[in-house]
Image (cartoon, grey):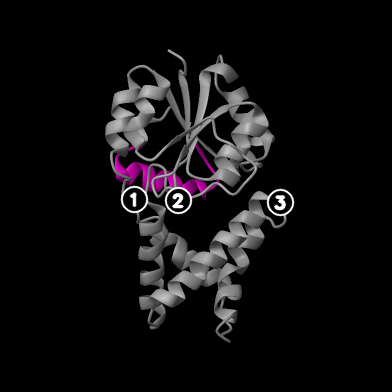
Amino acid sequence: MKYSTLLFDVDDTLLNFQASEQHAMQKLFENIGEELTPTIYEDYHELNEHLWQQYERKEITREQLLDTRFNLFFGKYGKQVDGQAYEAKYRSYLAEGHTQMPHAEELLADLSANHDIYVVTNGIAKTQRRRLSESGLAPYFTSVFASEVIGYQKPDPAFFDYVARKINGFSKSASLVIGDSLTSDIKGASAYGLDSVWFNPHHQQNTTKTSPTYEIDHLLRLESIVA
């Protein structure tokens, strides 16, 4: 067996984060009595993506991201809001979203017999644990490693160093990172000397300087790689 330790990202790798985000925003807007149009949702999505990329680059802290994203977002529309209160509501709605990516559970069930499977996520620990539990995927994982708890985030090599120290008998050559983000999962794996799989179901172009070891557009194609 080439890879015995599998390190999975969660959002848009195993769980459909886009669906969860849309659900949470729809619920938030219903709560505040506003209409969420496709254009407004796309504005939020782009802003949120930008903020998380800043967080990955250590330009802002997690607290700054969470405390200010709704102030920044509604500020674009000339509205002043209680950003922290909106954040708390949004996060509670986000935790309700646990739609699996196609074939996620089938893949984990197939791999769990002969592989040690872990989660490596930059998402909020409490939110991710609830989503994994309610999706039915939680039993397949030996541990969940969340940057919020670790104190370092992907792609920082310190994140993966922490993970390596917590896994008994960890071997770089026998470990594989699987995720959808080139700037987080794949870059982080490369920086720490780990092989990686870029899950790219929409066939996006790689415009970064980071190259994954493998690329797949269907989760079940991972099985032939890790065998």
Q: Is residue 63 magenta?
A: no
**Residue 99 appears at what percent x and percent y?**
31, 50
Report the span colored magenta.
Answer: 120-137
Which residue is denoted by mark 3 in the rendering?
A: 58
- At x 61%, y 41%, the residue is 154
Residue type pointed to by label 3: Lys
Q: Is residue 133 magenta?
A: yes
- At x 34%, y 23%, the residue is 112
Overall secondary structure of the magenta section: helix
Q: CA distance from mark 3 to mark 1?
A: 28 Å
Taking depth in this image into account, of 31 and 75 the one nearest to the observer is: 75
Which corner quadrant holds the N terminus?
top left
Q: Which mark lies nearer to you, 1 or 2? A: 1
Classify 214 as above or below 11. above
Classify 24 as above or below 169. below
For the residue labelled by badge 2, is the local secondary structure a helix, a strand or a loop? helix
Q: Is residue 107 left or right of residue 198?
A: left
Classify 156 as above or below 205. above
**Residue 184 appears at what percent x and percent y?**
58, 44
Q: Which of marks 1 and 3 precedes in the sequence?
A: 3
